[in-house]
Amino acid sequence: MPLDSLGQPINESSVAGHLLESPATVTSSSTNYDILELFTQNPTQGNIPVVNQKVAIGIINRNSFMSTLARPFHREIFGRKSCTAFMNAAPLIVDYHTPLTELSYQVLSGGENVLSDGFIITVDNEYAGMGLGVSLMQALADQQAEKHRQMMESIHYASVIQQSFLQSSRRDMATTLSDAFMHWDPRDIVGGDYYYFVKHPQGFFVAVIDCTGHGVPGAFMTLIMASTLKQVLSTHTLQQPSELLAAINRQVKQSLGQLSEGDAPQAETIEVHSDDGMDCAFCWYDQASRILSYAGAKTPIYLIEPNQHEVTLVEGNKKGVGYIATPLDYQWDTQQIEIKPGTRLYISTDGLVDQIGGHKRICYGKKRFREHLLKHCHLPMEQQKHKLLAHFNEWQGENSRRDDVTLFGVKLA
């Protein structure tokens, strides 16, 4: 099997030889009358290679030849002359094992003539056949389609992996909360949003996380954050959300090389390569005391008390977790809120409020979100979710989705 420049086996379907055709050939001794007869008797005969003793010296283009010979007196003047008079004497000649990508560059560099005439394919510098420009374009399109198919298969499988990280949270949520919903909707099959829920004898902990980016880069960040959160929980308690954020911040900045010269161990200078992190809301709910402990990194929570006609917006800190601008020793605030029975709690990533839509093509916004929370808060949580998302999708309309969307709601009994 032939090898490429790196010593790797060459896929036969991705080289010039895959396009090999074996049309009738002529020699330089053939006359233009011979060529005319060949084209006339064979309407499907394409361009003709001119080959002398296994060496290709040119290509005769059917359209060019027929139109030239059709001019007044050209047949009488040139008919008995050598066919080399009307051939392309400088055709593109490539080796059988030339990769299609390299061949495509050569064809494009050769201009329109190569696309219309085709190209000669050789083996050990001897004529083997020829290829057509249209066949090359089709092969490249098929190759690209196959790469796309493989990529999409990989992304779909990555989605299965990403969702497997959410299974334990789904199970705990289902067995802990009697009236709640969690809507997780990546923009691009996989995404940068992530959530974490864990039940506890004293209550529950929920985190809604929006990592940098969406699609595959965002999905990688969720895996980093999920792993970091798991490590941090092994040494910190759920009851202190702000301490969890601070610990995750330190670990993420160290892992992603976001330390400044003064922060680096032993004053070592670390080159910064990443300005990534997460915005999030961490909540611990203590059932006995009915106290909600909340710490937020640029992600607020929304509360509606029973018989209340307004939505309380509780803002977190303005620093994200990780990121170059967030100090290594930054401390988030924990806000403790006494919860009345029947209070509704909502958390959303900014993919919802930042979505462009409506006839003015503006952001959905927190105000509009709060209005619709208040409008449907009397319904069971699952019905609320459908109402909220129906309005959101109507708002988005034909505008493209800007980001991943995650929305959590629960009625605290």
Image (tube, rainbow, N blue to C red):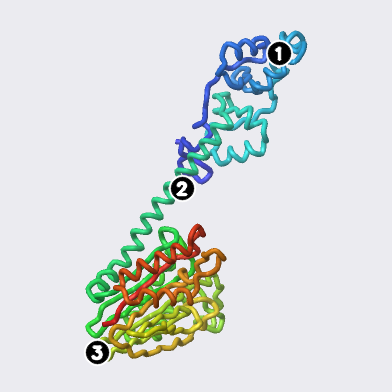
Answer few, some or many: residues within 10 Å of disc 2's Cα (few below 14, many 20 plus, some between 14 and 19): few
Query: Dot 2 lies on which element?
Result: helix
Q: Which mark is residue 82?
A: 1
Does the residue at mark 3 contact the one at mark 1 (Cβ under 8 Å)?
A: no
Amino acid residing under circle 2: His
Amino acid residing under circle 3: Ala
Residue 210 location, x and y as percent? 44, 71
Q: Quadrant of residue 382?
A: bottom left
Does the residue at mark 2 contact the one at mark 1 (Cβ under 8 Å)?
A: no
- Give the Cα distance between marks 3 and 1: 102 Å
Answer few, some or many: residues within 10 Å of disc 3's Cα (few below 14, many 20 plus, some between 14 and 19): few
Q: How many marks?
A: 3
Residue in front for this viewpoint, 89 or 145: 145
Answer few, some or many: residues within 10 Å of disc 1's Cα (few below 14, many 20 plus, some between 14 and 19): some
Residue 399 location, x and y as percent? 51, 59
Q: Quadrant of the N terminus?
A: top left
Asked if residue 48 lies left or right of residue 259, the reply is: right
Residue 194 visible here: yes
Earlier along the polypeptide chain: callout 3 or callout 1?
Answer: 1
- Give the Cα distance between marks 2 and 1: 48 Å
Query: Dot 3 lies on which element?
Result: loop
Q: Is residue 92 above or below residue 68?
A: below
Residue 24 location, x and y as percent? 56, 17
* For discs 3 and 1, the disc positioned in front in the rendered view: 3
Q: Quadrant of the C terminus?
A: bottom left
* For discs 2 and 3, the disc positioned in front in the rendered view: 3
* For discs 2 and 1, the disc positioned in front in the rendered view: 2
Q: Quadrant of residue 92?
A: top right
Q: Which mark is residue 288?
A: 3
Q: Which residue is mark 2?
A: 148
Q: Is residue 203 above or below residue 125?
A: below
Earlier along the polypeptide chain: callout 2 or callout 3?
Answer: 2
